[in-house]
Image: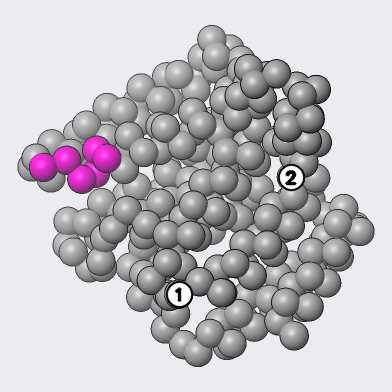
Amino acid sequence: MLVVQFGLIVLLVQYWQLESQPLTRLMWLAFVGFIIHHLLPLRFRLPFFATLSLVAVITGVGHVGPNVFAGWIGGRMTTANFLYHLLPGLTLVGIGLVLIGLCHLPIRFGARVGLIAIAGAGLAFLRAHSQWFPDITEMWVILGSLFMFRLMIYLYDLKHRTASFSLARSLSYFFMLPNVCFPLFPVVDYKTFCSTYYNEDWTSIYQSGLRWMFRGCKFQEP
């Protein structure tokens, strides 16, 4: 029943053309991922969600849809052109991994904060001169949305050890799947993100998520 409800929401988004075409592609990706995610053993679900989120970011930023994949697989598009479509998303993920890595360097906390501040200043400078890199222009807004506030929260929780840390948790937190289509995404607290992960019966969690998605569709103008 939950799968049917999710499928109907995806069809609703597609039929009404809500927000943008990338959102429709993201919804179909999330729908397929939801089914696979539920069938996986619990210990594999968070790593799978992290992987799915990375795929969503890479394909979403580069506007890589089924036609691009079909063209590449069918030989109508060269591998170089295919990789060119992936370049903005791969660049974003690469920068994000560097920023996360700086948070976990085995040096004093103050030094880590300083390095991240320097990196942030450098990225702000490059953003102001985005014409130097026209091929990746579209990724700057999403990069800021993903990391600008979450880095501060993440560093605080990292310093005070208020939650568990792992690669899958960090990737899932920073590259959260819906964020690529919504730059004005709410600020998510890392501690809450970890503590509420499967903290209730799965049916209640899934039903709550579907209810929020349906509310979002109701208040959108087709």
Label number found at residue 65: none
x and y, in percent, of residue 29 in the image: 68, 55
Looking at the rendering, in which quadrant would you find the C terminus? Answer: bottom right
Label number found at residue 41: 1
Residue bearing mark 2: 22
In the image, 163: left or right of 107?
A: right
Amino acid beneath label 2:
Pro
| Residue found 64% across the figure and 70% down from its top | 35
Residue 160 vertical position relative to residue 121 in the rendered view, above or below: below
Kindly report which numbered mark, 1 or 2, lies closer to the viewer in this rendering. 1
Q: Is residue 104 magenta?
A: yes
x and y, in percent, of residue 66 in the image: 77, 41
Q: Is residue 87 magenta?
A: no
- Part of the protein shown in magenta: 101-106
For mark 1, does the 10 Å Cα neighbourhood hold few (<14), some (14 to 19), or many (20 or more) residues? Answer: few
| Residue found 17% across the figure and 62% down from its top | 160
Which residue is at the far front?
Answer: 74
Determine whether the residue tagged by mark 1 lies in a helix, strand or loop. loop
| Residue found 49% across the figure and 22% down from its top | 127
Determine whether the residue tagged by mark 2 lies in a helix, strand or loop. helix
